[in-house]
Amino acid sequence: MLRSKQSDILQNKKLSQHDAELGRITLEPVKTGKLLGIWFVSGTAAFMLLMLIYTQFFGRNMVTLNETIYEKHRFVGKPGQVQLATGEGYGLTTYGHNGLIVNKPLNPDIQRVLFIGDSFVKAKQVSDVQKFTELVEVGWNEQHPDEPIQTLNLGLGGQDMTTYLSFGKNMDEEFQPDRVFLWINRGDFSKVSKNPKLLEQVAQGLEAQGLEKPIAQPERSNRLRDLINDLGFRSFFGQLQAQTFAYIAGEEAQTAEAAPILKAESSIGVQLEALKQIWGDRLVIIYYRSVPDMGRNAPMVLEDQILAELEAHNIPVINLYPVFWQAFQHHRPPVGFTNSILGQGHLNAYGHQLIADTVVQYMTGEGQ
């Protein structure tokens, strides 16, 4: 009887141990799942909080879009988009009217100089006071205190000839500049040159003394996109990608995109004449073409179709290639940063100063 009771107790103990083991095995995945869930939720919340704090207090691009100029549309540059960080360069800058430093009170008593262009003019890689557009104003006014000027920066990333032709008159009416410097590179002509319909619209606009409607393709915003931009997702991961791959892909894409215009002299001429129709003799082109191979095996002077067309259409031009080539010879790359690729990418502080000196020298030579 005693042995039977001991046997039953032992068997019950084994069964209890077995049941406990089964329970432990059953509960283990549940506990692991709960733990992973907690980690995932906590990690996501921490990431969102960090991104929100960074966006609101450090990386917000203070942009107010001037709808009278851009026809209530947001374009490739996406003014209003949150910028969490600069993909190259240093420091974070804030901008005003149109995403740039054209929020100055306009001075009607002095000459007004307007700078138009893409991200090279917007120049978010440096602070406002380091932009060549501001340095031109400072440099000129120091040298010519009796003939002061006010410079306005109207650069936006992603612009090209379609936006310059579509909204040039709007910019002109809004700011009424005495002189317009327009930053252009080879790829800016490509979109119109490769699209017969756009080219025809530009040609018809020449005959009609102005485009009937903008040829730039607008990108309308929506609530979902605004939310994504405001939370910083697009910019956050975009900057990671930019810093990972630097600007090699962008440089290659720009070169490939510009190739078709080499056989389209007439299309370039039509676009240049359309620019002249807007600004007349107030227009000066700042022409940028990158110096290859850090200037080591690059010729000082390149035969260039764009320059030939500018001369043929009697449009003044500041050609930056020789200036930049000289900078490379002195081992001072005017583009690129230590956190991107030196010699590629956007203008660094030295590049901005170099361009400012070149523009002031050009303006001084005009007055002689």
Image (cartoon, helix red, strand yellow):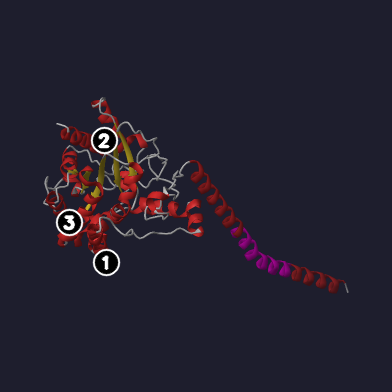
Coordinates of residue 147 in the picture (x, y in percent): 25, 28
N-terminal label among 3 and 2: 3
Q: Amino acid at mark 1?
A: Lys
Q: Is residue 368 left or right of residue 169?
A: left
Q: Which residue is mark 2?
A: 353
Q: Which residue is mark 3?
A: 269
Q: Does the segment drawn in magenta span residue 34?
A: yes
What residue appears at the point 26 percent right and 49 percent down from the top-left corner?
A: 278
What residue appears at the point 47 percent right and 41 percent down from the top-left corner?
A: 58
- Secondary structure character of the magenta stretch overall: helix
Position of 281 relative to 17 (above/below): above
What range of the chain is rendered magenta?
Answer: 17-36
Question: Separation of disc 1 and disc 2 at Cα?
Answer: 40 Å
Coordinates of residue 145 in the picture (x, y in percent): 26, 25
Is the residue under label 2 in contact with that under label 1 (CB below 8 Å)? Answer: no
Total numbered labels placed on residues in the image: 3
Is residue 350 visible to us here? yes
Q: Amino acid at mark 3?
A: Gly
Q: Which residue is mark 1?
A: 197
